[in-house]
Amino acid sequence: MAVWQYLLIVVPEKSTQNNYQCIIKNNTTKYLPKTKSLWKDFNGNGDSIISEMDSIIKRADWGDETYICWKGDESNQEDNDCSISLNGNKTQIEEFHFRIDLRKSSNITNTLKAILKICETNELVLIDLKGKIHKPKIENLLISLKESNATAFLTDPIKFLENLSKT
């Protein structure tokens, strides 16, 4: 993950009302927390979500039928990416997350807003790396975006790196 990318984990809204535990704080791995259990009751159309993602970010040349990845044009400061993991039958989403490159405003106005529309249509919510749940509207993400490591780095890279050595 590039330091200028803002990461969001996507889960069905209903799952956060019924059995949500802070997946970030309870994560014991060095990687993103697993959200498979939050998707088990999702009845939305995964194929439609995947098709819509194809229209937003170019499909990456890695992954497979159950691990689908997208990657933006890094050379054009469009280092946006997304991945969706499906179950073995390819019928159920098990994991969904994406990262937005904050170096270029069009990544927010075009890419992020388009992904938020997918989330809104499919009754999905977003979890930031601090474990806060957000409705898929840009105005709901503003504080999280402003407080993100990506924004801190882009605002003052030297200060950001100095602060890393203090922790």
Image: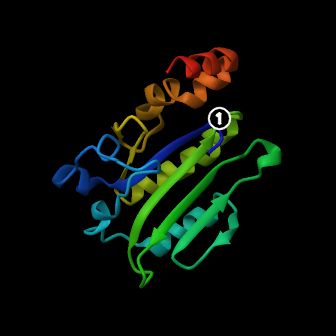
Question: Which amino acid lies under the numbered mark 1 shown in the image of this protein?
Answer: Trp
Q: Residues within 10 Å of mark 1 (few under 14, many from 20)?
A: many
The image shows residue 57, relative to residue 149, as above or below, that is below
Looking at the rendering, which quadrant does residue 149 occupy?
Answer: top right
Looking at the rendering, which quadrant does residue 100 occupy?
Answer: top right
Name the residue at 76% across, 41% down.
77
**Residue furthest right in the image:** 75
**Residue furthest bottom in the image:** 89
Looking at the rendering, which quadrant does residue 95 occupy?
Answer: bottom left
Name the residue at 71% across, 53% down.
72
The image shows residue 4, relative to residue 165, as above or below, that is below
Task: Give the image location of residue 62, x and y in percent.
Answer: 67, 70
Name the residue at 44% across, 72% down.
46
Give 167 or 70, whichever is nearer the viewer: 167
Q: Secondary structure at mark 1?
A: loop
Task: Report the colour scheme.
Answer: rainbow
The image shows residue 113, relative to residue 72, as above or below, that is above
Name the residue at 41% across, 53% down.
10
**Residue furthest left in the image:** 18
Give 107 or 25, whichever is nearer the viewer: 25
Task: Give the image location of residue 138, x and y in percent.
Answer: 48, 36
Task: Give the image location of residue 83, x and y in percent.
Answer: 54, 61
Q: Quadrant of the N terminus?
A: top right
Q: For this view, does 93 lie left or right of residue 114?
A: left
Residue ID for mark 1: 4
